[in-house]
């Protein structure tokens, strides 16, 4: 964000406004953390603000401060549409194309509000009046911290905002181990702890609330793990039946893909998860080093994300999806082995 953008945002926020704050579809810790932290700040400053999530978010985020006020679009579409229509300002956080909001996209496209984007994914769209896009950032939560700093609002950060931002930075950095974790990230984290974020409690709330059936589903996923040594690739499949047999809840498969990447010598890992209702196979892709799963997902699976973490989808059956995936890998053999 340049000086001009900062001045523009300050001007936009100088009088009380009706504001909507939007995370991406299937919101994760970073999407919820960033929207909730910003929401709390805007309400403190006298704005009327609402977080509208395109769809439900996982159980393991349902303790976050302020989450009980989130409006879920696909459950309360009428009320959400009215809020979007009436909004003077819309913040979009942790995504950069309106299509990432799924069914909510038409309502956002038709909105008359000015948009402000805060995001760290590659290839941002041009829908916003102010675009704060930085692909080197660990997380959108870290960006919200810098955003507040640029607005001279660091003193407004309270324990709840600090807790939300800490959560998103922790989840998007794989607990501070991905290469996107910088010295600045740790400085921000130190400041959030100073503001009251309880690191041990947050870690427990996110990672130590597994159900028995979820751990058994992890067992199935690990049994299904296949290795393709010639491509330094590992993949996991989970069918709808396997999910149903283990009382699948949203968020239960979060992180499963990382087990593939934990294998020695593996640089590319994928999980294929069948979603019968949407008639798709949802894919999560992860890599180590230079192999860009963002480009791979964009080229073959209508997806995208970051260099080392991306998502996508296939419209074929599970069997055909996997067969086609292995075929596709052949063209990447050199890159994967370099
Ligand atoms: P996950 O595999 O955890 O769903 O997503 C990994 C990363 O890729 C996240 O940063 C997420 O926002 C992004 N991502 C997931 N699915 C898609 C998609 O369909 N399109 C784009 N552009 N990004 C995605
Ligand atoms: Mn993120």
Image (spheres, helix red, strand yellow):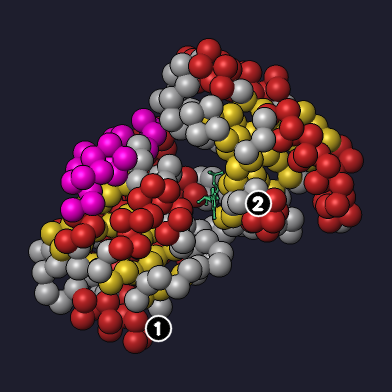
Residue 102 shown left or right of residue 266 in the figure: left
Kindly identify which residue carries mark 2: 297
User: Does the residue tagged 2 have its C-beta within 8 Å of any atom of ligand 1?
Assistant: yes
Report the front residue among 5 and 155: 5
**Residue 64 on the magenta segment:** yes
Residue 164 shown left or right of residue 272 in the figure: left
Residue 29 appears in the rendering: no
The image shows residue 297 at horizontal and vertical percentages of 65, 51
User: Which tag, 1 or 2, sits closer to the chain's start?
Assistant: 1
**Residue 69 on the magenta segment:** yes
The image shows residue 207 at horizontal and vertical percentages of 45, 32
User: In this picture, which residue range is highlighted in magenta?
Assistant: 57-82
| Mark 1 or 2: the one toward you | 2
Residue 120 shown left or right of residue 155 in the figure: right
Report the front residue among 262 and 311: 311
Kindly identify which residue carries mark 1: 2
């Amino acid at each position: 964000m340049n000086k001009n953008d900062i001045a523009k945002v300050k001007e936009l926020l100088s009088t009380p406004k009706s504001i909507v704050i939007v995370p991406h579809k299937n919101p994760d810790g970073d999407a919820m953390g960033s929207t909730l932290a910003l929401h709390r700040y805007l309400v403190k400053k006298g704005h009327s603000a609402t977080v509208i999530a395109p769809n439900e978010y996982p159980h393991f985020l349902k303790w976050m401060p302020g989450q009980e006020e989130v409006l879920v679009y696909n459950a309360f579409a009428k009320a959400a549409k009215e809020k979007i229509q009436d909004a003077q300002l819309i913040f979009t956080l942790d995504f950069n194309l309106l299509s990432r909001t799924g069914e909510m996209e038409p309502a956002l496209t038709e909105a008359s509000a000015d948009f402000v984007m805060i995001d760290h994914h590659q290839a941002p769209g041009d829908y916003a009046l102010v675009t704060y896009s930085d692909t080197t950032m660990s997380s959108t939560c870290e960006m919200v911290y810098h955003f507040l700093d640029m607005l001279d609002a660091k003193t407004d950060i309270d324990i709840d905002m600090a807790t939300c931002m800490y959560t998103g930075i922790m989840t998007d950095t794989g607990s501070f181990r991905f290469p996107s974790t910088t010295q600045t990230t740790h400085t921000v984290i130190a400041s959030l702890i100073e503001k009251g974020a309880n690191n041990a409690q947050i870690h427990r709330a996110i990672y130590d609330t597994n159900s028995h059936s979820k751990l058994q589903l992890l067992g199935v996923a690990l049994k299904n793990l296949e290795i393709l040594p010639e491509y330094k690739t590992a993949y996991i499949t989970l069918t709808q039946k396997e999910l149903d047999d283990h009382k699948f809840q949203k968020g239960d498969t979060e992180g499963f893909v990382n087990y593939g990447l934990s294998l020695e010598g593996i640089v590319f890992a994928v999980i294929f998860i069948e979603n019968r209702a949407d008639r798709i196979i949802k894919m999560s892709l992860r890599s180590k080093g230079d192999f860009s799963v963002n480009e791979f997902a964009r080229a073959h699976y209508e997806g995208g994300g970051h260099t080392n973490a991306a998502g996508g989808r296939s419209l074929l059956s599970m069997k055909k999806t996997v067969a086609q995936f292995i075929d596709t890998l052949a063209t990447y053999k050199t890159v994967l082995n370099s």
